[in-house]
């Protein structure tokens, strides 16, 4: 007889409670969408509590931070258009996704892909250029700042997608067709994205009316004058805050928040 590989992901405690609620959920039941959102909040709460108890849990903190720094470093190239046509997702994954084999590594790579998809869907004027990588002269910084936010929120959503998918496989395979893991991942990402600092907005807030200066003295470029000279470094400096926000170390209110599942 064959043997199966033991599940090495989250289990026990709040994870088990969330899994039990999921096992009782049915897509055709009354208030199914509301119940699934409550279950999603259960899973998010379980993750946040586990990470607050042990920052190194699942390797998610360090993996997300390293990937975020790599993504920040790639934004300048995207703005400059120094990316080949086609295969933007594959190139982003190669540049920022790392090559590890853990659940956290896989979540990072999927989050890069879903961030490209979601930002492309939110900007129909791009006509798919973000997916194909065919933006000619490069992408506008407001698009890239949206991509940055979507990535960090997506890391958590995609990590929980793996957890929920395994719980479904083990306990309630009848739910596979309902795709609860995909719906939970999307809900989590939607709730977290607003917590991620937006480099473009942070730069705009930091800029103040320039004082009178000696015309002969060189001045540093502002984000308004040359975004590519300022925003990649700013995006990198915001990575710890972005990771801390989505992983629950920096507490802010989440609409439809985790308390609904308490």
Image (cartoon, rainbow, N blue to C red):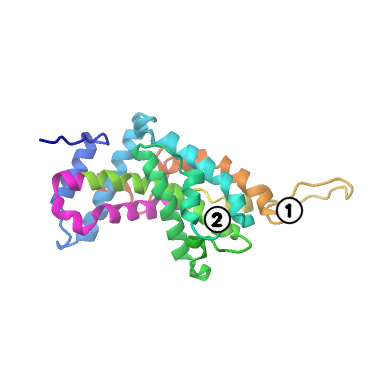
Q: Residue sitting at 24 percent across and 49 percent down?
A: 39
For the residue pair 104 and 231, the one nearer the viewer reads as 104
Question: Is 187 in the magenta?
Answer: yes
Nearer-the-camera pick, 17 or 138 = 138
In the figure, residue 175 lies in which quadrant? bottom left
Q: Is residue 242 visible?
A: yes
Which residue carries the number 1 mark? 209
Residue 101 is situated, as x and y percent measured from the top left of the image, at: 36, 37
In the rendering, at what x and y percent does residue 234 appear? Answer: 61, 44
The residue nearer to you, when weighing 193 against 151, is 151
Which mark's residue is nearer the viewer, 2 or 1? 2
Q: Of helix, strand and loop, which one carries label 2?
A: helix
Q: Main secondary structure of the magenta part?
A: helix
Q: What element carries label 1?
A: loop
Instruction: Say which label, 2 or 1, has the lower sequence index.
Output: 2
Q: Tell me if label 2 and label 1 are in contact, CB under 8 Å.
A: no
**Magenta-drawn stretch contains 218:** no
Q: Residue 132 carries which label?
A: none
Q: Distance between the residues labelled 2 and 1?
A: 25 Å
The extreme front residue here reads 1
| Quarter of the image that includes the N terminus | top left
Q: Residue 212: image x %, image y %?
A: 83, 50
> Mark 2 = which residue?
144
Residue 253 seen from this side? no
The part of the chain drawn in magenta is: 167-195
Q: Name the image quarter holding residue 79.
A: bottom right
Left/right placement of residue 6 relative to residue 255 reads left
- Residue 114 is situated, as x and y percent measured from the top left of the image, at 41, 55
Residue extending furthest toward the right: 216
Q: Residues within 10 Å of mark 1 (few under 14, many from 20)?
A: few
């Amino acid at each position: 007889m064959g043997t199966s590989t033991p599940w090495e992901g989250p289990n026990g405690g709040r994870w088990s409670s969330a899994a039990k609620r999921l096992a009782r959920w049915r897509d055709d039941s009354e208030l199914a969408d509301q119940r699934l959102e409550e279950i999603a909040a259960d899973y998010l709460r379980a993750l946040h509590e586990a990470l607050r108890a042990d920052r190194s849990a699942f390797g998610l903190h360090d993996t997300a931070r390293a990937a975020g720094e790599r993504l920040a470093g790639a934004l300048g190239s995207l703005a400059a258009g120094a990316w080949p046509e086609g295969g933007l997702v594959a190139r982003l994954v190669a540049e920022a996704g790392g090559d590890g084999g853990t659940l956290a590594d896989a979540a990072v790579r999927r989050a890069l892909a879903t961030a490209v998809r979601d930002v492309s869907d939110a900007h129909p004027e791009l006509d798919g250029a973000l997916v194909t990588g065919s933006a000619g002269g490069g992408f506008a910084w407001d698009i890239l700042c949206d991509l940055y936010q979507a990535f960090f929120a997506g890391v958590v959503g995609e990590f929980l997608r793996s957890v929920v998918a395994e719980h479904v496989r083990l306990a309630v395979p009848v739910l596979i067709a309902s795709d609860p893991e995909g719906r939970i991942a999307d809900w989590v990402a939607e709730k977290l994205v607003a917590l991620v600092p937006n480099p473009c907005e942070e730069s705009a807030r930091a800029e103040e009316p320039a004082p009178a200066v000696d015309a002969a003295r060189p001045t540093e470029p502002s984000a308004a004058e040359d975004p590519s000279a300022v925003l990649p470094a700013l995006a990198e400096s915001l990575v710890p805050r972005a990771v801390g926000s989505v992983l629950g170390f920096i507490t802010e209110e989440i609409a439809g928040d985790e308390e609904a599942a308490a």
